Amino acid sequence: MFVSGAAPGDLVEAELSGAGSFEHARALRVIERGLARVEAPCPIVERCGGCPVQQVSYAFQLAEKQALTADALERIGGFARGTYELAPIIASPLSLRYRRRARLHRTGARWGFAQRGSAQVEPVEECLLFEPGLQALADAVRACGDLPGVTDLGLLTSASGTGAVDLRGEKLTQSLRARAGKLLSSVRALKGITLTNAGTSGRSAPSAPELLGDPVLVDAPLANGARLRSRPDLFAQANRGAVPLLQAEALRAVGPARRVLELFCGSGTLTLPLLGAREVTAVEFEGPSLGLLRRSADEAGLAVKLIAGDAAKVARAWEAPVDCVLLDPPRTGAAAVVQALAKRKVPRIAYVSCDAPTLARDGKLLASAGYRLVHAVALDLFPQTAHFEIVATFTL
């Protein structure tokens, strides 16, 4: 029974949906408050689906995510508790105001997020997860008026206060280009814009974006001098304060390995900290992300070999010696990749996952090939939501 709007320990009156593989319900009234319940700070939490567990205290959120990690690894992966080291979950430095990036959807003349359990969009004027700079950028863009033909509005900010915007629609018109140019000149903190043609109703693939100004934002230097770059139309971790924590755990999982193959590298969030003392080959399907990684490595004078291609195909064809493979796949996991790695008997695999069930599923495949799960740690990069990251280390 999955009950939305409830907290652990609550006694609630709930409405059943009667649909789906599992029974779902919606809390209508709290009869008795559990110890985990707090007052949700957001006034639209019952409608907006963006951060639906605000009524659960942050300490309980962390405890539940730790329990979900152990449960998935045991129930789906077959890794009995006590057979590997499960480190305490790592909390986000901030439980609110932690997001440096977001994507808003159009609803009439306003912008917002999908409603809970619905494709309808809930208008959002202020989001309590936005960093102050991200909220200021969203406010400034909205204040400039309508953006004709734009269905999705991507927002990205840097620690220094500059920002970049992705305007995504089914057709890029001259009117939209003119409006984007006016927006760029009107918002002082706005550094650049990407105009992305998303195709028509999913029937065509997005074309390469058009760039106005310089939409690439640059982070502060890492210890080796590398500066991570990001763009509003490309994936980047949203929780600025937690990224160093994730990088540290990925480095721990890679361990002493000197020859590292990284799959699903993106623009280099986990790649850049590896560079300097290691021989690193990084693989990514999206060329623009690899371009940002190349700029970051070259700027710092750090060597890295980049391959543009499908991770599973590269893994199957890989023949060079490698001490560790680091992978950070999408939520769907990487079953084909881990099967290829297992056949090659890669001695160490550092798996970064944003979905405990798919990590456990892929881990089970590795276990069947003789790998041991030796360490796992959850990191809460997404407070007020049910999502979190896990870094797991497998060895032969």
Image: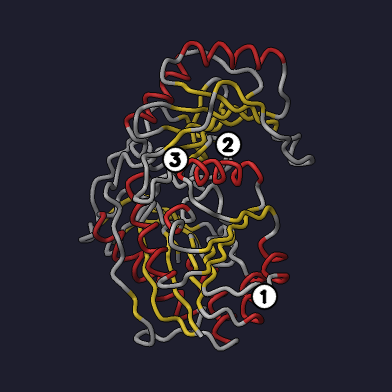
| SS at badge 3 | loop
**Residue placed furthest toward the right:** 203
Within 10 angstroms of label 3, few (less than 14), some, or many (20 or more) residues?
A: many
Choose top left, top right, bottom left or bottom right for residue 327: bottom right
Picture quarter containing residue 276?
bottom left
Q: Looking at the image, can residue 341 be seen?
A: yes
Mark 1 residue crowding within 10 angstroms, few (<14) / some (14–19) / many (20+): some
Is 28 left or right of 271, judged from the image as shown?
left
Residue at 39% x, 30% y is 134
Q: Nearer the viewer, mark 2 or mark 3?
A: 2
Q: Which residue is mark 3?
A: 48
Instruction: Give the residue displayed 78% in from the left and 40% down from the top.
Output: 204
Residue 364 versus residue 344: which sits nearer the camera?
344
- Of the numbered discs 2 and 3, the one sitting upstream in the chain is 3
> Between residues 384 and 359, which one lies in front from this camera angle?
359
The residue carrying mark 2 is 233
Q: Position of residue 291 (x, y in %)?
A: 60, 42
- Choose the circle earlier in sequence order: 1 or 2: 2
Circle number at residue 56 = none
Three-letter amino acid code at the position of disc 2 = Asp
Instruction: Tell me the SS state at disc 1.
Output: helix
Reply above or below: 247 against 232.
below
Residue occupied by mark 1: 340
